[in-house]
Image: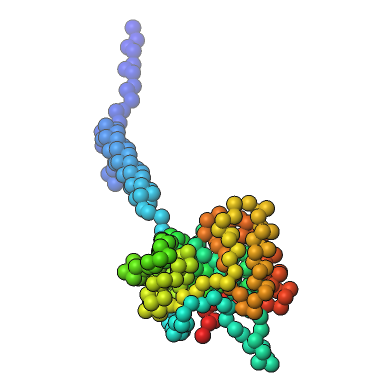
Amino acid sequence: MAATPPVARTPKAPDRAPAGRPRLRVRWDRVSVLVALVAVLATVIVHSMVAAVRNNLKSVDAKPAVTTVVPAPSAASQPKCPRPMPGVVRTAPVIHGETGEAQPTVALTFDDGPGPLTTDVLDVLQQNDVHATFFVIGQNAASEPEMLQRIVADGHAIGDHTWSHPIASARPGWKASTLTKQISRTRQAIVDATGREPCLFRPPGGIVKGAERVAHAAGLSVILWSVDTRDWAAPPSRKFASVIQKRAAAGLKEQHPVILLHDGGNRMATVAALPGIINDYRAHGYRFVTLDELG
């Protein structure tokens, strides 16, 4: 019986790599731990970045809005007020022509502003190349300094019309201490808004008694009017414009009238009448002047 030859066995691979070629053994358990740590670290970093961005946005939203403050014009270039005119002024400044003859002049004046339609008044004046004088109430001026800045920028004059527009009793007149404070507070509001000192004062209600001494002591000329349009009594309707225009035309009988108008309150009728008033005086050869041209 023939013997069966033994089965050849495959040689077993050696446990170690040949010399000079180290074998890389991957420890998957450690790799898994490392990957998990990297993922956790990345999550923490991303969360921190998101939180930082949110905090920055909140801080930006919490900051108050930045308001650009336009500095008031410097008073350095403004000449000092002239010596106050004696008594009470009721006529427009006199201007002489090339021949030396006095030209007819008219001063348009607006009281009690700034008001809701002051911009409309300024627009009409600008469109017609006319300058006027605005007697402002101090508390209105303090709340709307930009409006006073436009008045000055447009070439108009500004006067003091007291802080809160009190009306003194005609017989006793103004109490000196009260009027002094009213004038002083309004003067400061005008200076704060425009950088310019007012040189003119118009007493509310046209009550003069006791006002001259106080105003002159403050370096202000006292200004009234020669023509009262009574626009302050007109209802806020354009249909009353013709009435105001007709009243203003009474000054055409004068050589140098001062016209009383108002821009405080709802003066729709005054705004509507203004172009006609300007046309009436311009057609009769009058030159429009401001009351700071006195003296």
Q: Which residue is drawn at 43% across and 77% down?
A: 220
Find residue 249 and report its horizontal and vertical position in percent.
67, 68
Give the farthest residue toward the right: 283
Q: In this view, does 57 lie above or below 118?
A: above
Give the farthest residue toward the top: 1
Q: Taking the image as drawn, is residue 78 in sight? A: no
247 vs 221, left or right, is right
Quadrant (top left/top right/bottom left/bottom right) for the N terminus: top left
97 vs 209, left or right, is right
Find residue 106 and report its horizontal and vertical position in percent.
62, 75
Tell me which corner region of the image, top left, top right, bottom left or bottom right, holds residue 104.
bottom right
Q: Which residue is drawn at 36% across and 53% down?
A: 63
Q: Which of 53 and 216 is in front in this view?
A: 216
Q: Residue at x 70, y 74 (%)?
A: 282
10 vs 292, left or right, is left
Find residue 61 and report its horizontal and vertical position in percent.
38, 49
The number of numbered discs placed on residues in the rendered structure image is: 0
Give the farthest residue toward the bottom: 99
Find residue 53 and report its horizontal and vertical position in percent.
36, 47
Check the image and tell me how it is coloured. Answer: rainbow
Q: Residue at x 65, y 92 (%)?
A: 100
Tell me which corner region of the image, top left, top right, bottom left or bottom right, holds residue 126.
bottom right
Q: Is residue 96 above or below residue 71?
A: below
Give the farthest residue toward the front: 171
Tell me which corner region of the image, top left, top right, bottom left or bottom right, holds residue 229.
bottom right
Q: In this view, does 101 lie above or below 128?
A: below
Q: Taking the image as drawn, is residue 112 in sight? A: yes
